Amino acid sequence: MSDEIAVLGVGMHPWGKWGRNFVEYGVKAAQDALADAGVAWSDIQFVAGGDTVRNGYPGYVAGATFAQALGWSGAQVASSYGACATGAQAIATARAQILAGLCDVALVVGADAAPKGFFAPTGGDRPDDPDWLRFRVLGATNPIYFGLYARRRMEIYGATELDFARVKVKNSQHGYTNPNARYKKTFTIEDVLESPMVSDPLRLLQICATSDGGAALVLSSMDYARKHTTDPVTVAGVSTVTPQFPQTVIEMPNFATDSAATQPLPDTPFKDSIAQLAYEQAGLGPEDLDLAEVYDLSSALELDWYENLGLCNPGDAEKLLNDGDTTIGGRIPVNASGGLGCFGEAVPAQAIAQVCEVTWQLRGEVGDRQVEGARVGLTINQGLFGHGSSVILKR
Amino acid sequence: MSSVEKPQIPAVEGWLRMDEADPSLLGTRCEECRTVYFPPERTFCRNPRCAGSSFEEHPLSRRGRLWSFTNNCYPPPDPYVASDPFEPYAIAAVELEAEKMVVLGQVVSGVNVGDLKAGMEMELVLATLFEDDENEVVVWKWQPVAA
């Protein structure tokens, strides 16, 4: 298809708490992606940077910082920020350049060095910023929102703490041998259920940590790719949708939903609409997926994504999990990488890292966490303030 | 409410009717499409099918049904002003029937996650968020309606 592009190379700097500069993680990931692609840095025509945040603005305005660190080459540049969805925005920018014929080959880089503990807003007295206000007035940390979603599953579907713990255990079993993962150990149900409660029903081991890490992609036109490889992984869909009014599910960092009293509900709720656009672009549906990387900011949130992706009907996610369907070897493995449960989150790198994992899976290069025969994979996440993010890859 | 003599001020100017007998969140309503907003919109209507830019104040329903709930077991970071020693507190998402919207709020002190159940009727009350040297800062909190 003419609207596909190729993933020529992928690279990552391992996730962790390394205490070094984010530029170092991004450059290492970029160098690995260039080597993987067999493309020289000097041949890259366009750099799309995912921005980290420093003091409330895009730190070092990331795309140019990575380009300078790799050695100024005159490449064109763009920088993106969409909170957790930052990586998808950078991918979408590079893809648009390639599909428009404005460049043949692009580098996408995102990296972060994250503070410890709860994410918190930039300081000062800033009552016109909803993100500042939700901390000031409610003390509503990110896990508060995750806790509301988790409790909602328990209240309407009968989900249990044990179900949520099983997600964490599954993901740890998937990812503990992943060389790029931060938590290289398996957890038991008891480990999870004995960890301290943070935002009931979510315990420490069910909530995503903040991590350092970097990820990069070399993307190209199909014509350019054919000079380098005969069977590249391709990007068949990229979704960066926003919600439709009225948005009736409470979303970070808001105090309230939109009112649905006067206006008709959208045909598709926001979180369902994220994958829907990627499916439409790819001409594929949930039944075509061989694996998915979803944003398990909390273990319970992974279950919501099963339903938003159309892997099962609303209320059936616990059954899908408990039947083993989403475990490697099952019908539709989810978070074969280990997910955020094994990585923690390096915000501007995470959506790019999801694409790295699916690319390696489709090439059959991941060893003991391999999803056998995988041909189609999807990534999905969501950034605060209403940023959708989903990529479909195939081979 | 606390008994100190400090002046009471709302946590956010213009969001609260500071009437202990009849407290309410102060939303706005678009004069064209009648859509209600909280926090209050005052400039442009966010309904994409409406070009409205005039709003009237619209106090929100004081009661609603509990949509979901959780709690803070650890003190939130700044700019939250946490009690010392910190006491965990619950946060509720309450669905207002007339407005068809869900509004977050802290739950009153002494009501914990174990006391809550989705679908419960909840009522908005005024309560102290924190006190500083000059003022008692007042916020809305959700309280189960006594059965």
Image: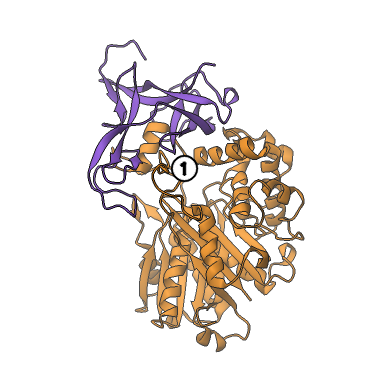
Chain colours: A orange, B purple
User: In percent of the image, x 44 and y 66: which residue is there?
Assistant: A90
Expressed as whole percent of the image width and height from the top left, the position of residue A333 reads 70, 59
The image quadrant where one finds the C terminus of chain A is bottom right
Task: Determine if residue A243 is in view.
Answer: yes
Q: State the image quarter where residue B115 is shown.
A: top right
Name the residue nearer the viewer: A236 or A52: A236
Expressed as whole percent of the image width and height from the top left, the position of residue A217 reads 51, 71
Chain containing the residue with disc 1: A
Expressed as whole percent of the image width and height from the top left, the position of residue A380 reads 55, 59
User: In percent of the image, x 70 and y 42: which residue is there?
Assistant: A163
Looking at the image, residue A284 lies above or below residue A210: below
B87 on left or right of B31: right
Q: Which residue extends farthest bottom?
A: A227
Task: Determine if residue B79 is in view.
Answer: no
A215 on left or right of A190: left
Crowd tier of the residue under label 1, counting other residues whose Cα lies within 10 Å: few below 14, some 14–19, many 20 or above? some
Name the residue nearer the viewer: A354 or B126: B126
What residue did someone put label 1 on?
A: A250
Q: State the image quarter where residue A193 is shown.
A: top right
Count of numbered circles on the image: 1
A1 on left or right of A162: left
Expressed as whole percent of the image width and height from the top left, the position of residue A4 reads 52, 78
The image quadrant where one finds the N terminus of chain A is bottom right
